[in-house]
Image (tube, rainbow, N blue to C red):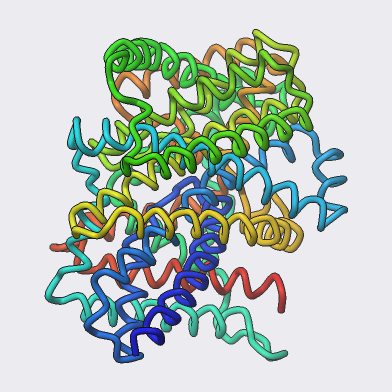
């Protein structure tokens, strides 16, 4: 019986690590949001253990499986936010990579493995500082632990199953299955493009795509205001200004130049905020035990030394492959360490991993300090997000285990296994998604990558429009509205923005958002799985 349980836990870990990686790969490229996958994994695990009658082993197994599977989820988010940037910067090079599926998949997997491994290595170094000395709460870890021990856990798992099955059936009836055409229309035209004086009401089509409602609901109020501001701004301000003041530009050129100004202002504002934060962190931690290893003993020290040697040898080979000089390598590794530490601190306090801001902080100075090419620019941003994201997720998982009293060694093994599993599958998943749907399409709009592309290409736009966008972006930062979410609303098709807004409003009007969270988690998981199935059907 014990052996059967261990085998079942191992198989579940493998499958949910692959599931987490695949689902979050799609969501990261389809929307500008990267929700935590851990709560969903807890509910799926509980449902599976109930189904196979392993009720007594739910609590500890759910935590171990979750901490393993969530590593792939955060790695997929980092990759989905950054990797497509290369497509928008150099389509010829990116398509050449895509033309060699094995090379593309292998290269993406190797980058994910070594970037994630470095983040895990950093987590080992700073675990004592973050979890013991500072005792950071990690709100997501608290949520996961409460879900594991909740009395109504099985009800939440059933809610997730209902959401998953209903959304999966809806998608099948909409897209068709086994050669049969869908019977549910994919869109309903509400308002066509109608000019009203100098204001043009856009074509609005409510795409019946539950994923947007689910992501909007899980994200909640945070997304509603920025996207609403973007829609109003575009209709009442940007379109008339383009028509009367910048008619020499095409609509695309005007929007891209304005958005580039917003990105530039956001980057400058973010870097200005990061300097004092990171400087304070470095000064504070001069006396911290950053190289503390949780499990003492000579044997573990030897393992640690061996791991460090193998890791840095692999990192050097990878960076030399992308033609990074020794100085550039030292710059990237040092600032990735510093940023990962600070990302983990922020996530430990507020529950949000601010990957993009820190990636920009490292990427922008590198563009001026070194003679970097487009591939290197993308690699720098991707590497910082991978390290920071995985480091934060590792510490979050260990916080859950600490709350549950699980032995550290068991948690370490599962987290390393989760990184290996996700690294093995992530390259193939990205190739399948990009090859089938195409980057820049409504299914894979890759808004985060497009925003980073605008920052890199900022010097090629009209400076008057850039200045206008910069003032607006700076004003948004001052009043506390997230500029990147507003940017997403300007760049994304309006149907996507409206779908997210509807979901966010739904979260605001229900009495208890957490009660509905399992259902909508099942919905976005089902739609992501369906889109993945479409790539191979």
Number of numbered markers: 0
Toward which corner of the image does residue 524 lie, by quadrant?
bottom left
**What residue sits 74% from the left and 63% below the top?**
436
Q: Nearer the viewer, residue 470 or 30?
A: 30
Q: Nearer the viewer, residue 496 or 321?
A: 321
**What residue sits 53% from the left and 24% below the top?**
360
Residue 32 appears in view:
yes
Toward which corner of the image does residue 115 lie, by quadrant?
top right
Against 355, residue 473 (above or below) is: above
| Outermost residue toward the front in this view | 298
On the rendered image, what quadrant is the C terminus found in? bottom right
On the rendered image, what quadrant is the N terminus found in? bottom left
Residue 197 appears in view:
no
Against 292, residue 177 (above or below) is: below
Against 267, residue 197 (above or below) is: below
On the image, the x and y values in percent for residue 377 come to: 68, 26
**What residue sits 38% from the left and 72% below the top?**
522
On the image, the x and y values in percent for residue 527 come to: 51, 70
On the image, the x and y values in percent for residue 251 come to: 67, 32
Against 110, residue 271 (above or below) is: above
Q: Nearer the viewer, residue 236 or 510?
A: 510
On the image, the x and y values in percent for residue 266 come to: 46, 21
**What residue sits 76% from the left and 59% below the top?**
435
């Amino acid at each position: 019986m014990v052996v059967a349980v261990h085998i079942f836990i191992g198989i579940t870990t493998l499958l949910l690590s692959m599931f987490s990686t695949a689902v979050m790969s799609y969501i990261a490229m389809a929307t500008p949001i990267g929700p935590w996958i851990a709560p969903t994994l807890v509910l799926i695990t509980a449902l599976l253990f109930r189904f196979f009658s392993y009720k007594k082993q739910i609590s500890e197994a759910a935590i171990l499986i979750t901490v393993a599977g969530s590593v792939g989820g955060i790695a997929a988010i980092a990759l989905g936010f950054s990797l497509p940037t290369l497509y928008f910067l150099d389509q010829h090079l990116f398509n050449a990579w895509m033309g060699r599926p094995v090379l593309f998949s292998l290269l993406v997997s190797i980058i994910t493995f070594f970037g994630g491994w470095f983040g895990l290595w950093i987590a080992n170094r700073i675990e004592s500082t973050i979890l013991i000395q500072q005792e950071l709460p990690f709100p997501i870890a608290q949520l996961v632990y409460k879900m594991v021990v909740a009395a109504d856990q099985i009800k939440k798992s059933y809610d997730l199953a209902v959401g998953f099955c209903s959304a999966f059936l809806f998608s099948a009836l909409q897209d068709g299955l086994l050669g049969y055409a869908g019977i549910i229309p994919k869109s309903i035209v509400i308002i066509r493009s109608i000019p009203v004086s100098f204001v043009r009401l856009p074509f609005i089509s409510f795409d019946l795509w539950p994923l947007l409602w689910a992501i909007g609901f899980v994200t909640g109020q945070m997304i509603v205001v920025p996207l609403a501001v973007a829609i109003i701004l575009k209709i009442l301000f940007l379109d008339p200004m383009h028509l009367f003041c910048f008619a020499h530009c095409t609509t695309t050129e005007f929007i891209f130049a304005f958005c580039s100004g917003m990105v530039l202002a956001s980057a400058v504002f973010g870097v200005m905020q990061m300097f004092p934060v990171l400087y304070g962190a470095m000064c504070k931690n001069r006396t911290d035990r950053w190289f503390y290893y949780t499990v003492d003993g000579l044997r573990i020290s030897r393992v640690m030394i061996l791991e460090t040697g193998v890791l840095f040898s692999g990192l050097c080979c990878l960076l030399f492959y992308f033609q990074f000089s020794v100085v550039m390598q030292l710059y990237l590794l040092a600032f990735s360490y510093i940023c990962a530490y600070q990302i983990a601190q922020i996530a430990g306090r507020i529950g949000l991993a601010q990957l993009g801001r820190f990636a920009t902080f490292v990427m922008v100075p590198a563009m001026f300090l070194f003679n970097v090419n487009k591939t290197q620019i993308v690699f720098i941003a991707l590497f910082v997000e991978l390290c920071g994201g995985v480091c934060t997720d590792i510490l979050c998982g260990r916080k859950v285990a600490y709350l549950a009293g699980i032995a550290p060694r068991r948690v370490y093994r599962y987290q390393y296994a989760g990184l290996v599993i996700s690294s093995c599958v992530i390259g193939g998943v990205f190739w399948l998604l990009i090859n089938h749907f195409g980057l820049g399409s409504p299914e894979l709009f890759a808004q985060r990558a497009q925003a980073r592309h605008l920052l890199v290409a900022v010097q090629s736009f009209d400076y008057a429009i850039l200045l206008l966008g910069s003032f607006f972006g700076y004003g948004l930062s001052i009043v506390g509205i997230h500029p990147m979410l507003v940017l997403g609303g300007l760049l994304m098709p309006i149907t996507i923005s409206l779908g997210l807004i509807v979901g966010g409003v739904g979260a605001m009007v229900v009495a208890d958002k957490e009660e509905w969270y399992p259902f909508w988690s099942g919905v976005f998981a089902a739609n992501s799985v369906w889109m993945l199935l479409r790539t191979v059907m």
